[in-house]
Image (cartoon, helix red, strand yellow):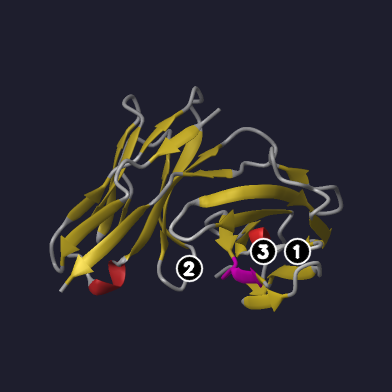
């Protein structure tokens, strides 16, 4: 069974600085997707970025980028120029590209605080 | 973009009563919907997967008779917590498979059983 591990329960970053959130996963599959979701205090889940496993190029969305290391099964999220609105719980998630339902498997989350 | 509407956002019910939570995909057809439970500052725990027109698939340890899921149309799935007890108090989130990014989440329902 696939598992997703986030080893940092809490992180803190100064406004305008850069922070990296870690995520590792375990799978025997070769075709899958990885996601980072943000859950602010409103608790609405918001997709931050996604990565397709067969793409070697790291995904980037404005200030958010990932470091995808497929062999190491690592998928870290880098937030540049951190803003107060980035404060939230961040979840890493895995989804197999095979199977009937393709459910998301979430990590335990990292609570990010942004200091003014 | 894809929108999933989840209602109610908050509900308080008495112990022993049943509560229904609705999840609607507003601008796309959701053949598959997922129901999650989330405790404070914890991750999302998948409870069940529902496919339109068929029985839901429950995760191990989830009581199917307590958490009734119905997915009768391509735009509506419901979760009914039957004979609710205080330990059922939690935050429940639905997610619909569909939309550009593949998964769209509802805004969640905070259930309090008193």
Q: Which chain contains the residue that carries disc 2?
A: A
Judge whether residue A80 can be spotted in this image. Answer: no
Q: Nearer the viewer, mark 1 or mark 2?
A: 1
Please check the rendered image and state whether residue B98 is part of the magenta-colored stretch, yes or no: no
Displayed quadrant of residue A22: top left
Task: Provide the residue designation for mark 3.
Answer: B86
Provide the residue span drawn in magenta. B106-112
**At 32% from the left edge and 49% from the top edge, which residue is drawn?**
A9
Residue at the spot x=15%, y=69% of the render? A15
- Considering the image in quadrants, where does the N terminus of chain A appear? top right
In the image, which is nearer the foreground, mark 3 or mark 2? 3
Q: Using the rendered image of the protein, determine whether residue A24 is visible from the camera's viewpoint.
A: yes
Q: Can you give x and y, in whole percent of width and height, for residue B33 in the image? A: 69, 55
Distance CA(mark 1)–CA(mark 3): 7 Å
Q: Which residue is mark 2?
A: A43
Say yes or no: labels 3 and 2 on the same chain. no
Give the vertical position of A29 relative to B68 (above or below): above
Chain where mark 1 sits: B
């Amino acid at each position: 069974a696939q598992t997703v591990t986030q080893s940092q329960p809490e992180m803190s970053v100064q406004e305008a600085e850069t922070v990296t959130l870690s995520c590792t996963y375990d799978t025997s599959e070769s075709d899958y997707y990885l996601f980072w979701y943000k859950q602010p205090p409103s608790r609405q889940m918001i997709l931050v970025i996604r990565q397709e496993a067969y793409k070697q190029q790291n995904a980037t969305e404005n200030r958010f980028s990932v470091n995808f290391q497929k062999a190491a099964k690592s998928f870290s999220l880098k937030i540049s120029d951190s803003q107060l609105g980035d404060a939230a719980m961040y979840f890493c998630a895995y989804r197999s590209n095979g199977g009937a339902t393709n459910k998301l498997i979430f990590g335990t989350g990292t609570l990010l605080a942004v200091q003014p | 973009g894809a929108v999933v509407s989840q209602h109610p956002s908050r509900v308080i019910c008495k112990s022993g009563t049943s509560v229904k939570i609705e999840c609607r995909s507003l601008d796309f057809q959701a053949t598959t919907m997922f129901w999650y439970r989330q405790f404070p500052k914890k991750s999302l725990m998948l409870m069940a997967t529902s496919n339109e027109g068929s029985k839901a698939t429950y995760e191990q340890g989830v009581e199917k008779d307590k958490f009734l899921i119905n997915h009768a149309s391509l735009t509506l799935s419901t979760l009914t917590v039957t004979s609710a007890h205080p330990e059922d108090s939690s935050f429940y989130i639905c997610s619909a498979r569909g939309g550009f990014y593949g998964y769209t989440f509802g805004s969640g329902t905070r259930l309090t059983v008193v």
